[in-house]
Amino acid sequence: MATFLYRLGRRAFRRRGLIALLWAAILVGAGVAASAAPAPPEDSFSMPGTESQKAFDLLDERFPAAGAEGATARVVIRAPEGAKISDPAGKARVEQLVTALGDGPQVASVADPFEADAVSQDGTTAYASVNYTVNAMELTDRARESLTAATDEARSGGFTVETGGDAVMAEQEMGGTAELIGIGVAAVVLVLTFGSLVAAGMPLLSAIIGVGIGISGIGALGSTLELSATTSTLATMIGLAVAIDYALFIVSRYRAEIAEGRTPEEAAGRAVGTAGSAVVFAGLTVIVALAGLAVVNIPILTKMGLAAAATVGIAVLIALTMTPALLGFAGRRALSRRDRKAPAGQRTASAAPKLGTRWARFVLRRPVTVLLTAVIGLGVMAVPATSLELGLPDEGSSAPDTTQRKAYDMLSESFGPGFNGPLMVTVDTRGADDAKAAAATVGKEISSLGEAAAVTPANFNEQGDTAVLTVVPRTGPSDAATEELVKDIRSLSDGIRSDTGATILVTGMTAMTIDFSQTLDDALIPYLALVVGLAFLLLMLVFRSVLVPLKAALGFLLSVAAALGAVVAVFQWGWLADVFGADQPGPIMSMMPIFMIGVVFGLAMDYEVFLVTRMREAYVHGSSAAESVTTGFTHGGRVVAAAAIIMISVFSGFIMEDDDMIKMMGFGLAIAVLFDAFVVRMAIVPAVLALLGTKAWWLPTWLDRVLPNVDVEGERLRKELGDTAESAEPAREPETAGV
C-alpha cells in the first residue's frame, strides 16, 4: 500500500493543477445540485418492527382521514386570575380561538375543549387539540403563521395562551456558527504547530473542500433519501474534524521529509506513502464505526451514520490527492521561515528534547504510576454513568422560556403530568365477533389496572373494524411508572385476543420512547461485536500485533465510559449546566450511548493509528521497544496533540447550537476526544507498551503467514527506493511465536 500511495502522492504533486481543478469542479457541481434540490426533511423517529410503529402504520391505514402521523398542536388557554374559562367571557374567548384555529391552512380538525372534556376541574384552564392533514415537515409557513396569529389574538384581556406539539416549530439557527468557531480555533492551532500560514492553510482548505462536497451531496440527496438537517450537521461535525486531522498528518510528514533533505516532490510522495497509509486505515476504522450504526435498524441512526461515513471517505480521498497537490503549489513555503532559511537536509530544531520526547521518557521511567493514575482518573469520571437514565427529548426538557415548555407546565399543573404523554391503544377488531364489545372490554381491562388517570371511550373508524382508546397515565412521560403502565397494558394482549379475538397495540410518543430505548439496548452488543471485531482486524493488519489492538480497544472503553459519565453529570445531573447551555437537565437522549460508542471508537482508533504507527516504524527499523515509544512521541506527539485540540474545538463549537441533540453530541464527542487523546493515547498507551516491551509486537507465526502485509510503515517502499541511510540499519522482524 505504501508504494501505491507513494506513487499517487508524487503524481498528484506533479499534476497539481489538474487535481485542484477536478476537486473544484466536484465541489461546484455538488453545490449546484444541492441548491436545486428541495429542502431536507425534519427528523422523524420511525422504528420498523416495534409495536408502536406497527400501531402507527395500522392507524395510517385504517384512519387515513385522521392522519395518524399528521402534525398536532395543543393550545392551552388559562383565564385571568380570579376568573374561569367556564365564565361567559372565557367561553367566548375559547370559541373565538377554536374558530381561528379551524380556519388555518392544512387543519384537519380542532377539538373544542367544552365538547372534548378538556377543561380542568378548577375551571381555570382548557386546551384545544389541533390535528393537521400533513406531518410536521410538510406544514407550510402559512399554516404555522396562522397558528401563531390565532394564539396571539387570544392572549388579549389577560388570558394566557401557550402552544405545544410538533406543529410548533422550535426556532433553530444553525447558520454555521459552530463550524466557524471550529475552523477559527483550528487555524490558530495549525499556525502555532507549523509556524507557517501556508502550511496551516492547507489542512483547512482541504477540509473545507471535502466537507463542502459531503454536505452538498447530502443536501442534493436530502429529499430523495430523507436525510434531515441533523444528518448534515453530524456529517459536518465529524467530517470537518477528521479532514483537518488527516491533512495535518500528511503535511507534518512532508515537512519532516523535507528536513531530511528530500526534494519537495519526493517528500510529498513519501508523506502520502507513510502518513497516507495511516490515514487510510484510520479513515477505515471511522467508516466502519459509523456505517455499523445500520445494525441498530433505526432509520435516522442509519442515515446519520452512512452520511457521516461518506463524508469521512471523501476526507480520506481529499487528504491523499488534494493535499499533495496543494503541497505542489506551496513547495518549501510549507516550511516555517526559519526552516526555509536553513541549508537543505539540516534540521533547525533546538538541541533540547521536545515536550513529547520528555513526556515519553517520563512515562517509560514510571509506567505503573502513570497507568494507575490514568485508569483511576477515568474510572472516577465514569462513575456518573452508573446513574444513566435514557429517554427522548420532550417538551418538558425544553427551555423554561419557550411556549412549548410553558404549555407543558400548564397542562401538568391543571390536568396532571400524564396529560403530556397520553398513550394511544389501537384495537384491531377484525378478528372479533362483536367489535364494540371487544373495544369496551379493552377499556375495562386497562381501567382495572388502576394505573391510569383516565381511559377515553373507544373511537371507531368508518369501517368499524378499528378503534382507538386514549389512556392518560397518572405520571409524566419520562416517569418509570408510566413505562410500567405501558408494559402492563401490553401484557393484556394475549388474554384479550383469546377472550375477544381483538388485537391491541400501544403507541404514542411515550410508548415510542420506550420502544426506541429497548431497540437500542438490544442492538448494543451486536453493534459492539461488529465494530470492535472489524476494527480489531484492521489494526492487526496495521500493527501486525495482537496485544496492541487489544490495548486500543480496552483504552477506548475507558474513554467512552468516562465521557458518558461527564455527559450524565452535565445534562442529567445539571453540574455546570449553565456553562454548557443545558437549559433543562433530564434523561440522556436514548441514542447517545450507542452513537458515542460508534463515533468515539472510530476517532479513538485515529490517534492510535497515527501515534503507534510511528512507533512500529521505528521498531521495525532497529529501535528497541522503549526507543520506539520515544521516537513515536518525538515525531508524532505534538502533531497528535494538535489534531486532538482541533477536533475538540470543532466539536465544542456545536455546544452553542440551540438543538439539544446537537448540543449533547458536541459536548459528548469533545470530552471523549479529550479523554482518549490526552489520557488514553498519551498516557495509558506508552505506559502499557513500556510494561509489555517487545511482547507488544507479538503475533502468532500462523497468523503472521495468513495476514497480508499492507506495509503501513513503508518498509517495502524504502527497499524499492534503495534508501542508503535507512538500509544501513537492519530492519527488525516483528516478534512471532508458534502456537
Image (tube, rainbow, N blue to C red):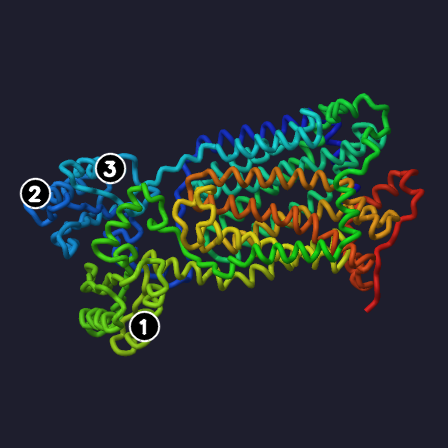
Q: Residue placed at 65% from the left, 57% from the top?
A: 375
User: Regarding mark 3 in the picture, which secondary structure is present there?
Assistant: helix
Mark 1 and mark 2 in contact (Cβ < 8 Å)? no
Q: Residue placed at 34% from the left, 56% from the top?
A: 509
Q: Nearer the viewer, mark 1 or mark 3?
A: 3
Nearer the N terminus, badge 2 or badge 1? 2
Q: Residue placed at 82% from the left, 35% from the top?
A: 352
Figure quadrant of residue 497:
bottom left
Residue 606: give x, y in percent of width and height: 66, 46
Amino acid at circle 1: Ser
Q: Nearer the viewer, mark 2 or mark 1?
A: 2
Amino acid at circle 2: Ala
Mark 3 and mark 2 in contact (Cβ < 8 Å)? no
User: Disc 3 marks which residue?
Assistant: 148
Image quarter of the C terminus: bottom right
Can you tell which mark lies on residue 493? 1
Q: Nearer the viewer, residue 437 or 737?
A: 737
Figure quadrant of residue 434:
bottom left
